[in-house]
Image: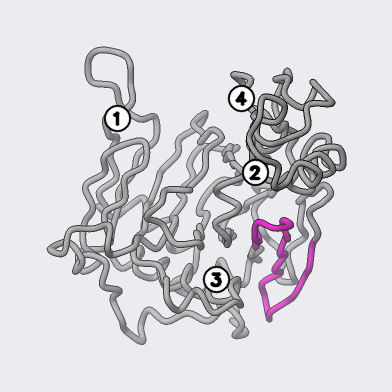
């Protein structure tokens, strides 16, 4: 029996860790345990922890995981766009995109939701529910998910540190995990954390709580605000009294949030600041894992003749409400 897979019918026991300045709030539905992590001035990361009742329910994650392996959903490896090597260089993982076209490190031809297998449509509505529960500022109704990227990971494959901060994306991104467990870690990007790029260029944005030398940088930023450009303050407007503020540091920023994602769990990141100032990595720990990630692609960034691909399939058969009590069969 997989020690990471939820087997209890009560609320799942979290194995997450977080550091200051991140704070945590917890709420419960009938079967989900929901942990929301608040990143000051940036947004929230909400973790929906599933249990065996959720996973074993008809149409739930257990059946989804089997269907993902049995049905032809279109997963394949794609050529890397930024590869410096000659020849045909492919991604390690397998992927397929449904809904609005989405381009990240590879060119993935998107298929319309009308062609999506039932298992992906069921997952889509489950993820939409998680987005609705995570966002309480009214923005989700105007930027509901219209794209789903499904990625398959085999043993030893992972997604290194990156962000989902493309200009054409909405502020909310949510993922459903199926299969083996994975560790998701979140850290501040190098320049926002240290106040300087790896090349020694000063970082001009106001310092964020949790960054290196926060109080010192905040004081310098406050004192130099509004000062005219001159040889004394041209390095980002900061008073040059502390040369360490502009000295590249060794190593990487520390991990501030670590989530243990188990089979059936969902994660929702909300807030453009998270993608601008933070980066995340996902490392599976098993033989096979699927991640199904939904985003909102702004229609203005997509050719008009492709807008129909993002039309969501509506049917009572696909509706999902994680607050309802599900009785295991």
Q: Please tell me whether residue 31 belongs to the stretch shown in magenta.
A: yes
Residue at which label 1 appears: 81
Disc 1 versus disc 4: distance between alpha carbons? 27 Å
Residue at which label 2 appears: 205
Tell me the element at label 2. loop
- Nearer-N-terminus badge (4/3): 3
Tags 1 and 4 touching, CB below 8 Å: no
Residue 60 in view: yes
- Residue situated in front as seen by the camera: 51 or 278: 278
Q: Nearer the viewer, mark 4 or mark 3?
A: 4
Residue 53 is left or right of residue 238, and the answer is left
In the figure, 209 relative to 114: above or below? above
Residue at which label 4 appears: 201
Residue at which label 3 appears: 130
Disc 1 versus disc 3: distance between alpha carbons? 32 Å
Counting from the top left corner in percent of width and height, residue 315 is at: 31, 84
- Residue situated in front as seen by the camera: 164 or 194: 194
Q: Nearer the viewer, mark 3 or mark 2?
A: 2
Residue 250 is left or right of residue 326, and the answer is right
Counting from the top left corner in percent of width and height, residue 79 is at: 27, 30
């Amino acid at each position: 029996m997989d020690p990471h897979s939820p087997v209890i019918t009560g609320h799942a026991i979290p194995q997450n860790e977080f550091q200051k300045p991140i704070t945590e709030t917890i709420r419960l539905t009938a079967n989900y345990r929901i942990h929301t992590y608040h990143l000051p001035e940036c947004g929230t990361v909400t973790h929906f922890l599933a249990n065996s009742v959720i996973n074993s329910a008809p149409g739930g994650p257990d059946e989804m995981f089997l269907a993902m392996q049995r049905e032809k959903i279109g997963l394949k490896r794609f050529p890397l766009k930024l590869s410096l090597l000659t020849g045909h260089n492919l991604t390690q993982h397998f992927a397929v995109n449904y809904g609005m076209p989405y381009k990240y490190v590879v060119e993935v031809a998107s298929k319309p939701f009308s062609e999506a297998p039932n298992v992906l449509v069921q997952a889509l509505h489950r993820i939409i529910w998680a987005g609705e529960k995570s966002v309480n500022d009214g923005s989700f109704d105007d930027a509901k998910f219209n794209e789903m990227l499904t990625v398959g990971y085999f043993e030893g494959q992972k997604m290194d540190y990156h962000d989902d901060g493309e200009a054409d994306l909405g502020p909310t991104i949510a993922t459903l995990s199926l299969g083996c467990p994975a560790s998701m870690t979140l850290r501040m990007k190098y320049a926002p954390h240290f106040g300087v790029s790896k090349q020694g260029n000063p970082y001009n944005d106001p310092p964020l709580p949790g960054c290196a030398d926060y109080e010192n940088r905040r004081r310098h930023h406050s004192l130099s605000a509004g000062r005219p450009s001159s040889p004394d303050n041209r390095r980002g407007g900061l008073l040059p009294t502390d040369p360490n503020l502009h000295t590249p540091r060794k190593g990487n920023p520390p991990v501030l949030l670590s989530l243990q994602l188990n089979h059936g769990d969902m994660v929702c990141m909300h807030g453009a600041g998270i993608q601008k100032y933070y980066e995340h990595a996902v490392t599976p720990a098993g033989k096979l894992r699927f991640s199904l990630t939904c985003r909102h692609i702004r229609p203005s960034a997509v050719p008009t003749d492709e807008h129909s691909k993002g039309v969501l399939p509506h049917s009572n058969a696909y509706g999902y409400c994680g607050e309802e009590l599900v009785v295991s069969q």
